[in-house]
Image (cartoon, rainbow, N blue to C red):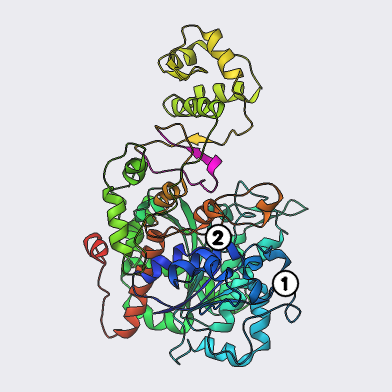
Amino acid sequence: MKYIELFAGCGGLSLGLKSVGYELVIANELSPMAAESYAYNFFDENLQEQASLKSPKLKKTYWLSSQFPKSSLSSRLRENPYNFPALGSGYSDINPDSTNLKGSLIVGSIVDLNVWLEQNSKVTANLKAGFDGGGVDLVSGGPPCQSFSMAGLRKQDCAKNSLPWEFAKFAKTINPKIVLLENVTGILRPFKDENGKEYYAWFELAKAFAAIGYVPLCLHVNAKFAGVPQNRPRFILMGVRKDFFDQLSQTFNASEKSLFSQPLNFYNLTKHDHDVDLSSLKYFDVSKQDDFKLYKDSFLAPLVAHSESLVSVFDAIDDLRLNGSLSSKFAQSTFNVFQKTLNKCAMKNHDLRSNNELVKRRFRIYQVLQKVTRSTQKQVSSVMKGDSDSISTDSWKELANFDYLIESGKLIKFKLKKDFVEYLKGHKTKKQTQKALIANQPAPAALSIPDDACHYEELRTLTVREMARIQSFPDNFEFRSKVTTGGKMRSFEVPQYTQVGNAVPPLLGRALGLAISNLLSRHLTSHLDQPTKVSKIEFEAA
């Protein structure tokens, strides 16, 4: 099964796909910092080591256009990707006759890559053929989502919102059997234009993929049901090329016919230039009982294989505490699942970050807040923001039961409400989104920088490795480049914490890979009347 990955990041989706037998044709990533991790883990190319040499030798990692020559690799690794030179005016590692692209990573903009392919038909033909004439089975990727996120800009005309359409443009050029686009669930909520008219990005994307020949199946999934210890809902658009769909449809069971009935009708309406509105296509929401059953009884079964056995934060990272026990069952299982995909052995990226005493005291407050009612949480938060100077008697009754860290380093219980309120006022903060993790639950979705959460027991932020565990990365996947960043550089740098937070969780990628491989295998055995149902046991064995 051959795939191309766009917006590859550090390689979470690639790791999941490779673990079930997918072979990389090429990958594309904008950020040199994320590309450094991708190259290190999948190609065993140490770009930092190569950068120290006078003549770096890269076998699998190529820049489409850079301000710097290959001999200045160290400068390339810190280059602002939004300042990459226009095609033809910078330093490029690839040429129209290049035969070294198979299984490689191209560092550069998808916009420039699309233009470059238009200009170089020979490479495009080889790429479309999968370099060996067999074609490409899957083009996958997760375009940057800040503008679609409910925590982001939410602007219809934001430049980043064009990237999913660049994805569609690339897919039209390559013509794979299946396309897979992953994004945040904010894409499901409407934008409003200057006139107040609602605009649904996911629906417009479905129309775009239908227009280039794909039947679009739209899904609202959650990574926690695929074994990821994080409550991470995601939008998935899975498009099946129409000629391939016609062959597959002969193998569909009842649930699969229900899944594809409306998308097929939507495709036909779109192809015949009929006006379509939002009612003509639905997305299947895994959190809804009827839709969940369709997942469970179809090729989508791997996406819900762990719905009855969710993995908690405690399961994922408790062994990484200062006095933690032996490697957790979860860590061992992810290592076993991905061990044939990665060559590394040692665990890295578990360096503790220092937090000052004031921050530690605030972390203790956050830990307490996860154990009280929502109303009490809001009142405490309001005092810490400086918007209020009191809490209710009922809230105080809850809060008085817990110990709090004071300046001496001791944990004490406050006896008087007024003293506790003064304590809260002494710990004011603008970081109102920061929370303590809840040990017996999956982690929240928003985890991309150290400030997003603190440990459920220890008074500290999470390490890169702990965040990686929560995302289901195995311990032998090493994150490269800077650990974190800030200030103006935050707009273009992608350090280790952000690489983890932006990634598709590998176990979700694996589940998606299993689902799609189910369809691809039917093409080879289309004489069968019914597909083999993938059970939870078979999924875990795989």
Q: Which residue is mark 2?
A: 279
Mark 2 or mark 1, which is nearer the start of the sequence? 1
Separation of disc 1 and disc 2 at Cα?
48 Å
The dominant secondary structure in magenta is loop
Q: Which residue is mark 1?
A: 67
- Answer whether residue 296 is magenta in the image: no
Tell me which corner region of the image, top left, top right, bottom left or bottom right, holds residue 537. Answer: bottom left
Q: Tell me if mark 1 has few (under 14), some (14-19) or many (20+) residues whose alpha carbon lies within 10 angstroms of its own.
A: some
Q: How many marks?
A: 2
Image quadrant holding the C terminus, namely bottom left
- 375 above or below 59? above
The percent coordinates of residue 220 (x first, y second) are: 46, 56
> Looking at the image, do the residues carrying marks 1 and 2 touch, with CB atoms under 8 Å apart?
no
- State the residue at coordinates (69%, 47%): 487
- 151 above or below 519? above
The percent coordinates of residue 393 (x first, y second) are: 50, 10
> Disc 2 marks which amino acid?
Ser
Q: Nearer the viewer, residue 318 or 152?
A: 318
Q: Nearer the viewer, residue 223 or 61?
A: 61
Q: Secondary structure at mark 1?
A: loop
> Disc 1 marks which amino acid?
Gln
